[in-house]
Image (cartoon, grey):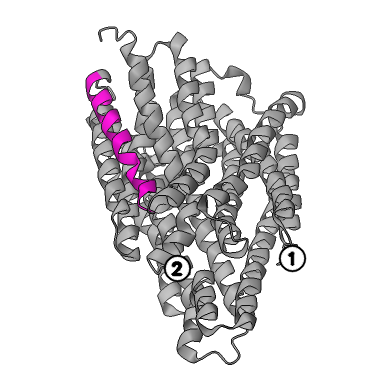
Amino acid sequence: MKPLGSRKWWALAALALVTLAVGVDGTVINIALPTLATDLHASNTQLQWFVDAYLLIFASLLLPAGLLGDRFGRKKMLLIGLIIFGASSAACAYATSANTLIGARAVLGLGGAFLMPLSLSVLPVLFTPEERTKAMSIWVAASAVSFPIGPVLGGWLLNTYWWGSVFLINVPVTIVALVAVFLLVPESRSETRPRIDVFGVITSSIGLASLTYGVIEAGAKGWGAVGSLVPIVFGLATLTVFILWEHRLTSSASGQPLIDLALFRSASFTWGTLLATLVTFAMFGVLFVLPQYFQEIGGADAFGTGIRLLPLIAGLLLGAGVANVITARAGAKLTVAIGFALLAAGLGMGTLTSLSNGYGFTAIWITVVGLSLGFVMPTAMDAALSALSAERSGVGSALMLALRQVGGVIGVALLGTMLNSAYRGHLDLSGVPNPLAATVEKSLTAGKAVAQQLGSTALLDSVRSSFIYGMDVMLGVCGIIALVGIVLTLVFLPRQSDAAAEATPERVGLDHEVVVR
């Protein structure tokens, strides 16, 4: 390959922009939920699918996308991913109904599933080992910055333009990246073209989709309803088949499984991954409910909602810095345990939220939650990755990235269901006509609209207090999860991986990538 000179840094800048766009998509949708509920007349279930359609496809296709890159060429698959991402972003922007937006978000997840692992995989092709740490840091920084930029940029766009602008902004970024990747990134592929585990891809994708669909439907129809129970059981059964199939391929000398289950023989990998997934479960639930609380209860606009989320991000960044110091002195076990204790404390404070609380109280507890995320996520992921051998670091990091996204999907689905059920069960619908009562039960936004239509202060108070009650219940469940996390950490997570000291600079950069995402 001919030396690329300074051109490779321009290619990295384009890849960093794409990484930033993918990260922003993961956060900006939460800011837009109240606006979408009004403009597209979306129910709570549809609001959950706006988030889950993207996350589900993204998580379930990360590993297949990496395999396709290895087999057919990473540059080729990256270009295809960019085209899908740009086209589906435009489709999201001009969606005319809730169901259309859900479909476009699913395709957007497909594009993102190609972009994240493949944009990372081409860095070793572009840069020498001496340059790679700096290049990786830039790529990682772009992903990390998406956390605070998403809420603020999304809020400003929603206040200044129509809601489609939060998706349309991806189009020019994608065009720039397409040109840069085409001109500057060399083609690369695996020397031994791996076979694609077609059965594994199909069963994992169908299983995850069916399970998540069933959990979301349970919020609207009840856990015992056929429409929710059947897909849950089918999803669990399909995932069981998937695991058995992967075990068979892992045990076979000639098998090439989608997921190498032998990775889970390492305690550091297993528990680092599971604990990071556990905290992601809680984080996505919090990010789902806070924008609705700030806008529909607190009266903030979209931009103000983004600003109000900044303490969470500030806490995360501060927590990550402090966690590094503690880990170096006392090990990962203590750091992660402290993080889960902070998470339980912050969420416990959150359960005390009432209509009389101002933003100051909320800012305190979400800052504590942010601190806890900074303690747990990077430390747990680093513990897991430090246990991987050099030849397994790629598949191991992809697996952890997928599991974290799955944790977010299930978190939004399950916790959103709890919020929805608690909201409906706490409503006082005395004197409200049946058709309107059914509308009130759909969501906070719909309930407020009916109360204003009827001119009923009592109904409005009931709707607002019922949402807060549901939010408190959801935060309480997350707090219990945090307490479980403390126990699991102290019992199972090794203090420090035996392989940690053997990490190469390349692996260290890869570790950091998985943490922030």
> Left or right: where does residue 290 sit relative to residue 171?
right
Q: CA distance from mark 2 to mark 1?
A: 28 Å
* First-in-chain label (2 vs 1): 2
Where disc 2 sits, the SS reads helix
> Left or right: where does residue 45 sit relative to residue 373?
left
Residue 221 drawn in magenta: no
Q: Are the residues at dot 2 and dot 1 in contact (C-beta closer than 8 Å)?
A: no
State the mark number for residue 45: 2
**Residue at horizontal 64%, vertical 25%?**
498
Coordinates of residue 251 in the picture (x, y in percent): 41, 40
State the mark number for residue 380: none
- The total of numbered circles placed on residues is 2
Q: Considering only vertical position in the picture, is 288 above or below 488?
A: below
Name the one closer to the observer, 43 or 417. Answer: 43
Q: Kindly indicate the quadrant of the structure image that contains residue 367.
A: top right
Magenta region: 163-183
Name the one closer to the observer, 205 or 200. Answer: 205
Name the one closer to the observer, 436 or 371. Answer: 436
> Left or right: where does residue 296 sit relative to residue 84?
right
Where disc 1 sits, the SS reads loop
Coordinates of residue 1 in the picture (x, y in percent): 25, 10
| Label 2: how many Cα within 10 Å (few below 14, some 14–19, many 20+) | many
**Residue at horizontal 51%, vertical 53%?**
302
**Badge 2 amino acid:** Thr
Coordinates of residue 205 in the picture (x, y in percent): 36, 53
**Residue at horizontal 59%, vertical 56%?**
290
Coordinates of residue 293 in the picture (x, y in percent): 60, 61
**Residue at horizontal 68%, vertical 64%?**
472
Mark 2 against mark 1, which lies toward the viewer?
1
Residue 179 drawn in magenta: yes
Main SS of the magenta segment? helix
Q: Which residue is mark 1?
A: 356
